[in-house]
Image: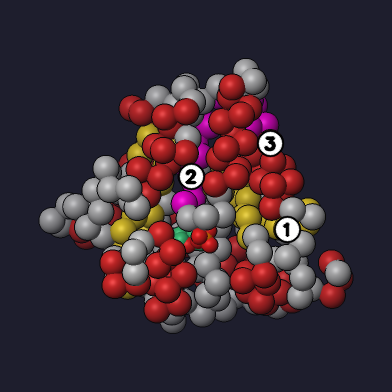
Amino acid sequence: MKWEIYKTLEEASKKTAQYIVNELNLKPNLNLCLPTGSTPINCLNEMVKLYEEGKADFSKANIYNMDEYVGLGKTHPEGYYYFLQNHLYSKTNVDLAKTYSFDALDVDLNKQCKDYTNIFYKNGVMDVMYLGIGTDGHIAFNMPKEIHYLNAHLENLSSEALSANAKFFNNVDEVPTQAITIGIGMILKSKRIVLNAFGKSKAETIKQLYENPVIDPQLPATFLNLHEDLTIIIDKDAASLINEFK
Ligand code: GLP
């Protein structure tokens, strides 16, 4: 596990964008899985900037959503497909035919999960898995719980996740209570993983991840301890409770 701490989230996001674009330049048909939420916005903006400067070509990349709220379609402004469409696809030369996402309106969600697991591997394993992290330690939408799934599956969102994500909706009651998500196995099979965490609200979670080399199913991000090529890029606020980084 490699840790990189930067003064600001802008700086950390720039480094993350550079990390991803370096991989893209090495392999133009990169298999890339992207997160949503507030964390990746600056990084995605930086990726757009690199494209505009002629330093990134997304035309051959295969880009995957990692999760989606149940009941939100591709055009819903708080849906996760729309998020990537809005922040990256519409501003770069991403080929929409090479973008993949859950159909969270499917009447048979269990079949949808099976289908998405197959789609996820159709171009080979993920080259780069870019993750955010919830204040409860969730990665993608793998919530704290006793038993975790390897493949795509349905999740009931924790009350902590619901209240954290209420900022994107008018109120907490509007946040869908279920999501479909890639499983822990799909994350760990990726060749490289890069995780961002920004702000004081993530500091306690990041401290736990740093100080406890354990697998704790109640802190799903600890599964990442099993991966051999994990880079954690955070800002100083997220690192603020770790003595070594003070
Ligand atoms: C969301 C997403 C995760 C994301 C996390 C953190 O619910 N499902 O992929 O990493 O929660 O969100 P934020 O970046 O807004 O703090």
Q: What residue is drawn where x is 69% and y is 52%? A: 9
Earlier-in-chain disc, 3 versus 2: 3
Q: Quarter of the image for the N terminus: give it.
A: bottom right
Secondary structure of residue under mark 1: strand
Q: Is residue 30 magenta?
A: yes
Toward the front, the furthest residue is 170
C-alpha distance separating marks 3 and 2: 16 Å
Q: Is residue 190 above or below residue 100?
A: below
Report which residue position mark 2 lands on: 33
Judged from this view, the residue extending furthest toward the top is 54
- Depth check, front residue: 169 or 95: 169
Tell me, yes or no, whether the two marked residues, 1 and 2, touch with CB atoms within 8 Å: no
Name the amino acid, label 3.
Gln
Q: Which mark is residue 235?
A: 1
Where residue 121 sits in the image (x, y, percent)? 40, 42
CB-based contact (under 8 Å), mark 1 and mark 3: no
Q: Nearer the viewer, residue 82 or 221?
A: 82
Q: Is residue 186 visible?
A: yes
Residue 117: in sight, yes or no? Answer: no
x and y, in percent, of residue 139 in the image: 50, 63
How many residues crowd mark 3 within 10 Å: few (<14), some (14–19), many (20+)?
A: some
- Seen at 40% across and 67% down, the residue is 166
Kind of residue at badge 2: Cys
At 52% from the left edge and 75% from the top edge, which residue is drawn? Answer: 136
Does the magenta portion include 199? Answer: no
Residues shaded magenta:
21-36
Residue 74 x %, y %: 27, 43
Question: Which dot, 1 or 3, sits closer to the camera?
Answer: 1
Per the image, the residue denoted by label 3 is: 18
Give the distance between the C-alpha atoms of the residues marked 1 and 3, in whole angstroms.
16 Å
Label 1 residue near ligand 1, CB within 8 Å: no
